Image (spheres, grey):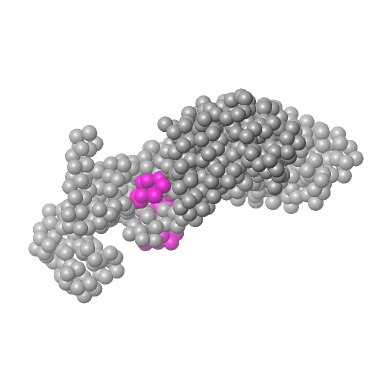
């Protein structure tokens, strides 16, 4: 990115963080987190907030089918566990029906107050699932993580860390350091993942962490790594206490 | 104002040293350890019951640092903690270069009085530009000048390893155990609580010190983590740095709302820092000494394919397993090597795949070992060579004919001179321990690397060979 684009991105990120702080939140919504990361040059699926079924259908039409709907809620943390995520929605009728199901599921699980609409995003092209994240180490400041993604990441612990700032060779090395690296090189006929794209995301996250010390924790899980690029399809950002 | 590296250099290379508060109850441990000091040694002690014993040691005693009639470069202070601020003031008044505060009972106690005293002496030292080492530490060791804190530490020798330790015990053991393995320090610093000078300062010093080729370090935590990372990166870009991190206890954040924070344990983050800096991580004193020993005595790494030379079939398998587990490949030799081995290798009770099961060949024909080593030196499939030296087989022969061990060593030295491939020996196992120790010392005196087990040889060679060739100091030796 050019300097002026970087500056505009940094301003946009600051606005998003300020809005969350004003609302008394440390945890950003998926829509906010993706907007902030997108402004910082991280490839994310375009994701927008819909307050009603008709708006969801309109956004889906603009983004292009198939789409994904996810519940937006300040209180529900594990969205898929309560039936708050619907994938592979191919047309307006499917979106409208899914909206109703998600709303009912959220209200049943956590009460009417918990439902804050849905996020709408295009279904991303499939790829190997990886995770990237950042946390603030009390001694060493921001630390980046890379690993194979999915629900077992905390069980398998097959992850690599580096302290910010990262050099290009650090990004290259941490990707190759995990046990599961052969999966990314093309395993059982799958095409190899675009490692250069993954390295670029790690370097963008390193800059993001340096520019925004108010980010306490960050997860991109999963990032879908295809043979021609990589895209974060879910994102979580926790800000430091105000 | 930070303490300058020149100031630290003066303290580590002193002409005059004074010990404040040494006592009979400790066996005058400081003055006795410093008996070997090549410059002028003084004592400061006001207790008349102690002065007699000190004078009996032949050390001139004074009532105060300010009364000593020459500038003092280095002071060891062993007084009770309440007296410590007075001695620190005296050091500043007398223009002392630096002081080790052996005294403990400061912030490490967690009690208010200790914390307050630590803050007081820290502020005094910074204000007075005094290089304060510690408190709660053993201070400095310089074998070349005979500066010691234990009476068995080496002296009259010049080493090339700079050791930095947050623990006095680990510093002491590194110097004592290291000496048995030919690992001698250029300088050793035990820095305890590190309130004025901390790990990053000592790393900066060792990185700049011309006499230090290898830096080794025991650390539990850094006060300024980001500065530590900068200093570590800068040091590791110039010299091999080997780090033993103690107390890897902090779990990931249990309150974390992300996978990343939950997985970022103390250990995971430290390992990342060490890798990122290009330093080598070890997990014990023995491993640290092994890796330094390998760095001193092996040539720079070239690749991961190792040729193995053993005395029996069983040891061939054990050696191959140990090296494979440490990440080495045990390749087939080149066809030309097999063709030449076929001309002289005794396959009755032996074999020459890789490993070479060679007892039957080399024990009947002394020149055969040189031929085997020449083949390993020239084989294009081989990046490194490891050989079993069996005290079990040879102890009685070495006893009968010392020339046999000498001839073995000459063959190994000859290989070392003609080959650029890293080479290690392992003495394992040995029920004839006295003979094995003799062989170890003889190999070490000849400059050859020797390890007490296959596993330790494989690990140390693996770690040292992983270092960037430009940093591997064995290449020059």
Position above or below: B322 against B38: below
Residue occupying image coordinates x 36% and y 40%? A165
Total residue callouts: 0
Asked if the magenta segment contains residue B277, the reply would be no
As drawn, which residue projects farthest toward the front?
B48
Image coords of residue B8 (percent x, y): 53, 30
- Please state the extent of the stretch shown in magenta in the rendering: A133-160
Check residue A156 for magenta coloring: yes
Q: Residue at x 78, y 49 (%)?
A: B430
The quadrant in which the C terminus of chain B is found is top right
Q: Classify residue B259 as left or right of residue B108.
A: left
Q: Quadrant of residue A23?
A: bottom left
On the picture, is B179 further left or further right than B131?
A: right
Q: Quadrant of the N terminus of chain B?
A: top left
Left of B411 or right of it: where is A111? left
User: For the point 67% across and 26% down, which residue is it?
Assistant: B39
Residue toward you, B334 or B177: B177
Residue A18 visible, this angle:
yes
Outermost residue toward the right in this view: B400
Residue B431 is situated, as x and y percent measured from the top left of the image, at 80, 51
Q: Which residue is nearer to you in this view: A207 or B308? A: A207
User: What residue do we see at 52% from left, 37% from top?
Assistant: B88
User: Quick one: A132 or A130, which is closer to the camera?
Assistant: A132
Instruction: Please indicate, yes or no, whether residue A125 appears anywhere in the rendered image.
Output: no
| Residue farthest to the top, as pictured | B70
Q: Position of residue A146 (x, y in %)?
A: 39, 50
* Residue B427 image-quadrant placement: top right
Q: With A22 as the anchor, is A214 left or right in this view?
A: right
Q: Position of residue B418 (x, y in %)?
A: 69, 27
């Amino acid at each position: 990115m050019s300097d002026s684009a970087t500056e505009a991105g940094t301003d946009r990120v600051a606005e998003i963080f300020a809005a969350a702080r004003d609302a008394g939140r440390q945890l950003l919504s998926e829509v906010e987190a993706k907007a902030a990361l997108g402004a910082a040059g991280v490839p994310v699926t375009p994701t927008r907030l819909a307050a009603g079924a008709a708006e969801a259908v309109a956004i889906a039409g603009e983004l292009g089918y198939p789409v994904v709907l996810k519940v937006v809620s300040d209180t529900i943390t594990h969205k898929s566990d309560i039936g708050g995520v619907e994938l592979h929605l191919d047309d307006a009728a499917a979106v409208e029906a899914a909206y109703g199901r998600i709303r009912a599921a959220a209200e049943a699980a956590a009460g009417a107050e918990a439902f804050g609409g849905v996020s709408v995003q295009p279904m991303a092209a499939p790829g190997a699932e990886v995770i990237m994240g950042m946390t603030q180490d009390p001694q060493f400041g921001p630390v980046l993580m890379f690993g194979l993604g999915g629900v077992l990441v905390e069980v398998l612990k097959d992850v690599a860390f580096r302290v910010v700032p990262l050099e290009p060779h650090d990004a290259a090395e941490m990707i190759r350091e995990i046990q599961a690296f052969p999966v990314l090189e093309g395993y059982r006929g799958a095409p190899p993942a675009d490692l250069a794209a993954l390295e670029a995301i790690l370097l963008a996250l390193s800059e993001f962490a340096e520019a925004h010390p108010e980010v306490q924790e960050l997860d991109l899980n999963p990032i879908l790594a295809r043979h021609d690029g990589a895209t974060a399809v879910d994102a979580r950002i926790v800000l430091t206490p105000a | 104002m930070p303490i300058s590296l020149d100031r630290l250099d003066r303290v580590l290379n002193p002409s005059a040293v004074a010990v404040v508060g040494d006592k009979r109850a400790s066996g005058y441990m400081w003055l006795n350890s410093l008996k070997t000091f090549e410059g002028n040694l003084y004592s400061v002690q006001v207790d008349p019951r102690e002065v007699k014993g000190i004078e009996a040691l032949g050390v001139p005693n004074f009532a105060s640092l300010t009364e000593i009639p020459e500038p003092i470069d280095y002071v060891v202070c062993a007084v009770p903690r309440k007296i410590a601020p007075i001695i620190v003031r005296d050091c500043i008044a007398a223009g002392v270069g630096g002081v080790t505060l052996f005294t403990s009972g400061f912030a490490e106690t967690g009690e208010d009085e200790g914390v307050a005293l630590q803050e007081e002496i820290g502020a005094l030292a910074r204000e007075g530009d005094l290089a304060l080492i510690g408190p709660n530490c053993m201070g400095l060791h310089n074998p070349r000048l005979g500066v010691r804190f234990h009476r068995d530490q080496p002296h009259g020798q010049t080493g090339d390893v700079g050791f930095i330790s947050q623990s006095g015990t680990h510093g002491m053991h590194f110097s004592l155990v290291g000496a048995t393995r030919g690992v001698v320090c250029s300088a050793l610093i035990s820095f305890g609580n590190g309130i004025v000078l901390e790990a990053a300062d000592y790393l900066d010093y060792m990185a700049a010190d011309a006499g230090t080729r290898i830096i080794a370090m025991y650390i539990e935590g850094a006060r300024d983590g980001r500065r530590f990372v900068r200093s570590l990166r800068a040091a590791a870009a110039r010299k091999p740095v080997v780090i033993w991190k103690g107390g890897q206890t902090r779990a990931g954040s249990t309150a974390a709302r992300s996978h990343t924070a939950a997985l970022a344990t103390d250990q995971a983050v430290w390992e990342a820092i060490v890798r990122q800096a290009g330093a080598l991580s070890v997990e014990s004193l023995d491993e640290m000494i092994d890796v330094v020993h390998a760095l001193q005595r092996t040539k720079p790494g070239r690749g991961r394919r190792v040729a193995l030379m053993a005395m029996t079939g069983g040891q061939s398998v054990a050696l191959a397993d140990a090296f494979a587990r440490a990440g080495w490949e045990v390749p087939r030799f080149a066809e030309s090597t097999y063709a030449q081995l076929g001309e002289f290798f005794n396959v009755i009770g032996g074999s020459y795949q890789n490993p070479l099961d060679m007892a039957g060949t080399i024990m009947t024909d002394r020149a055969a070992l040189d031929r085997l080593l020449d083949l390993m030196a020239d084989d294009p499939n081989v990046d490194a060579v490891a050989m079993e030296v069996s005290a079990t087989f040879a102890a009685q022969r070495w006893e009968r004919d010392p020339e046999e061990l000498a001839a073995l060593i000459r063959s190994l030295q000859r290989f070392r001179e003609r080959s650029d491939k890293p080479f290690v020996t392992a003495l394992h196992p040995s029920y004839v321990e006295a003979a094995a120790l003799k062989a170890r010392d003889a190999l070490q005196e000849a400059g050859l690397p020797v390890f007490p087990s296959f596993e330790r040889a494989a690990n140390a060679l693996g770690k040292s060979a992983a270092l960037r060739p430009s940093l591997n100091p064995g290449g020059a030796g």
